[in-house]
Amino acid sequence: MKCLIPVAALLFFALPVCGQILDRIVAVVGNEIILESELNAQMQFYVSSNKLDPNTPGLKDQVLQSMINEKLILARAIEDSVVVTDDEVKQQLDAAIQQRVQQFGSEAKLEEIYGMPISRIKREFRDEMRKNLLTQRLQQQRFGTEEISRREVQEFYQTYKDSLGTVPEEVQLARIYIKPGFDKDAHDAAHAKARLILDSIKAGADFGEMAKRYSEDPGSAAAGGDLGFVHRGQFVKEFETAVFALSENQISGLIETAFGIHIIQLLERRGDAVHARHILIRVPRSERSDSVAIALLDSLRNAILGGANFAELARKYSDDKETAIVGGDIGTDAIDNLDPSLKSVVGPLKEGEISKPEKLVTGNNYGYQIVWVKKRTPAHTLTLDGDYHRLETIALNYKRTNDYQEWLEELRNKIYWESKL
């Protein structure tokens, strides 16, 4: 038997509650009600997300109280005439549904699990998405611009300094990343293979069957190359330019990206989202292309050790475009939070040192990088002078939490609510 997911479950990505749907009212807040089916869905989501025992004493009431708080904020938002536009609701609803599509693998699977077509899912959940956005908007208006003075930070530190704990060892890193180029013979062979597939499709071969047979994208090949609905900004540049230039049902020529050679078909367009499928033919990289990448990084490393500017070389040579524009800067993080492969590279380095070229594997792709330890800060106890900005953030979050709790108590005293659990 199919089971419908309560409205709130879509917004918070809870799992469906199968079996008999209970409609007993468990709380009333102003003009809103909370059903037991909604509470059960939120319980299931909460315990699965936090790996908790659902039978923990008081847990169900804790979840219900949180849902009551959301309804209280909604009531105040309506009272204060907070507004969200239809476009904002549509964009957020489309994004929520797309996340679900990606989670379940296809729109068809999503429709099967929810027991309704996508069009009905949108109709059913639009009002709840609007309510969710209203509560977010009111909280942003009330607390988003809240600030804290230096005196408040100092008072917070003096009050809680003995319980703030220690800062773990941190490193500030930058890198230059080089992706090996394609071997010409391998590129020509892959291009010829992709051309034969494209010619076959133009001659009448089924796109989906050709994708299942030949595509080397493990994430979509089994589904006939189907990528589902994806919003603008989520594809690599070359792919995105090509897919958004297509008309519905049109098939592209051969499109080259860092992943290989693609054949793309646009199935449907909805605003800034497209539903496409593709066939990917990868271009293998040879030992020679690896050697060229390593040699380039070695020469860059030697130049930096000789006095060249790391940031300038990163901007000029790094294939990681996101970090290249900021001089290769990766940011600052606790060393224990680093990816194991990066931690093994950084671990032995002292502040100011640069690693030798190291291979970096990401999914089905790889490249080589050199990493510079710009700064290394040992574990230490928080101090007002040395960690002011960190303390400012902690103190501001503490202030916001207290103000938020006081605000909720005010709402509970002014707006009618009743738990029937």
Image: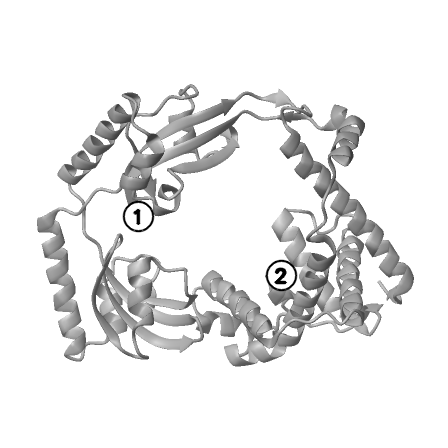
Q: Compared to 208, does 175 lie above or below?
A: above
Query: Residue sitting at 60 percent across and 76 percent down?
Result: 86
Looking at the rendered structure, which numbered label has been put on residue 377?
Answer: none
SS under mark 2: helix
Question: How packed is label 1: few (under 14 Cα within 10 Å), some, or many (20 or more)?
Answer: few
Asked if the residue at tag 1 contacts the one at tag 2, i.e. Cβ–Cβ closer than 8 Å, the answer is: no
Residue to which mark 1 is pinned: 364
Residue lying at the far right of the rendered structure? 413
SS under mark 1: loop
Looking at the rendered structure, which numbered label has been put on residue 12?
Answer: 2
Where's the N terminus, which quadrant? bottom right
**Dot 2 amino acid type:** Phe
**Dot 1 amino acid type:** Asn
Query: Residue sitting at 77 percent across and 63 percent down?
Result: 73
Q: Is residue 253 left or right of residue 356?
A: left
Q: Compared to 184, does 280 lie above or below?
A: below
Q: Mark 2 or mark 1: which comes first in sequence?
A: 2
Query: Residue sitting at 76 percent across and 23 percent down?
Result: 162
Residue 183 shows up from this direction? yes
Distance, label 2 to label 1, CA atoms, is: 31 Å
Q: Is residue 362 left or right of residue 185?
A: right
Total numbered circles = 2
